[in-house]
């Protein structure tokens, strides 16, 4: 890979992270090709080969995934196609010609122990989404090419996400009921995009956890979002009721404590902002885009 600003190819271009990554990378001087699902099906070897030949990237960042966690339970074959088979095909195509950066998730862990989870911790996904993402990780490692698996969690950025959903409900004046017994690190895609590029600059390989600082529940994040939206005049400060996971049953089981440990990233000099600062940055960006 050349020093400075390697050429990037992004998959899943319409997703939150890819949109932020394209923006941040171009601002840093990278040449970026970004391909959406209709441009590139990562589970089709011929399409992947053509994309690599055309773009000739030094780094391919795979942001493509089937991320609708509950729907993965109903469509396990589609989940595995996107989250396991596709990454394996990308790894084989990239071997010997490009670094593959693959974005993964805390869902590969069971999240049953109340301490941050390091990269080498034992996996044990609780749902089909997590199982398919873990299969993708394993396939990349087995191929053996140059790779970085970047696990992250609870992302919010341009496009549909939890924070935007909460603010929309508050704007409509609807009281909210939000789970308080699942903990994680809410992560702004703009900050995550910068951290991925910093990891490239640092020469990181293997597996790396990247997420914003601070640990919080979905309930606490919702309260903060509603209060900040009210301060900006976007919505009323509607009541937010804390409930348990058992009170809101979903098809897919979630890790109760999916908090990713960040020590390796910190040792590499990669630091993301605290989730509260990230939330404010995200809302500022949303305000600027909407012209409110």
Image (cartoon, rainbow, N blue to C red):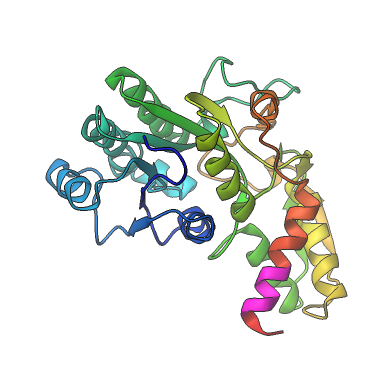
Name the side, left or right, on which 183 lies relative to 58. right
For residue 187, above or below residue 151: below
Which quarter shows the N terminus? top left
* Image coords of residue 58 (percent x, y): 33, 41
Name the side, left or right, on which 58 lies relative to 254. left
* Image coords of residue 149 (percent x, y): 46, 30
Q: Toward the viewer: 34 or 169?
A: 34
Residue 123 in magenta stretch: no
Which quarter shows the C terminus? bottom right
Residue 287 in magenta stretch: yes
Specify whether residue 105 is in view.
no
* Image coords of residue 285 (percent x, y): 67, 69
For residue 37, above or below residue 133: below
**Which residue: 16% across, 43% down?**
49
Q: In which quarter of the image is residue 254?
A: top right
Name the side, left or right, on which 104 lies relative to 153. left
Q: Toward the viewer: 163 or 35?
A: 35
* Image coords of residue 132 (percent x, y): 38, 33
- Please tell me whether the stretch drawn in magenta is mainly helix, strand or loop: helix
Q: Please provide the residue range marked out in magenta.
A: 284-289
**Which residue: 42% across, 33% down?**
133
Name the side, left or right, on which 36 lies relative to 72. left
Q: Toward the viewer: 249 or 167?
A: 167
């Amino acid at each position: 890979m050349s020093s400075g600003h390697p050429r990037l190819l992004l998959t899943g271009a319409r997703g939150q992270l890819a949109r932020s990554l394209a923006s941040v990378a171009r601002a840093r001087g990278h040449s970026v090709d970004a391909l959406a699902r209709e441009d590139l099906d990562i589970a089709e070897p011929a399409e992947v080969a053509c994309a690599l030949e055309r773009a000739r990237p030094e780094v391919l960042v795979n942001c493509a995934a089937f991320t609708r966690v509950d729907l993965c339970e109903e469509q396990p074959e589609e989940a595995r196609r996107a989250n396991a088979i596709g990454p394996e095909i990308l790894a084989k195509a990239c071997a010997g010609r490009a670094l593959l950066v693959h974005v993964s998730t805390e869902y590969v862990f069971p999240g049953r122990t109340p301490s941050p989870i390091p990269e080498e911790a034992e996996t044990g996904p609780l749902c089909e989404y997590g199982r398919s993402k873990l299969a993708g990780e394993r396939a990349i490692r087995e191929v053996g090419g140059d790779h970085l698996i970047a696990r992250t969690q609870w992302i919010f950025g341009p496009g549909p996400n939890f924070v935007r959903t909460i603010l929309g409900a508050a704007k409509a004046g609807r009281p909210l009921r939000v789970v308080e017994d699942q903990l994680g690190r809410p992560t702004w895609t703009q900050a995550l995009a910068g951290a991925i590029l910093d990891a490239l600059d640092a020469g990181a390989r293997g597996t790396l956890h990247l997420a914003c600082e601070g640990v919080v529940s979905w309930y606490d994040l919702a309260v903060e979002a509603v209060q900040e939206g009210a301060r900006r005049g976007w919505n009323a400060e509607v009541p937010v009721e804390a409930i348990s996971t058992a009170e809101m049953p979903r098809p897919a089981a979630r890790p109760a404590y999916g908090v990713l440990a960040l020590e390796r990233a910190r040792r590499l000099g990669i630091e993301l902002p605290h989730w509260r600062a990230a939330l404010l940055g995200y809302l500022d960006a949303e305000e600027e885009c909407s012209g409110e």
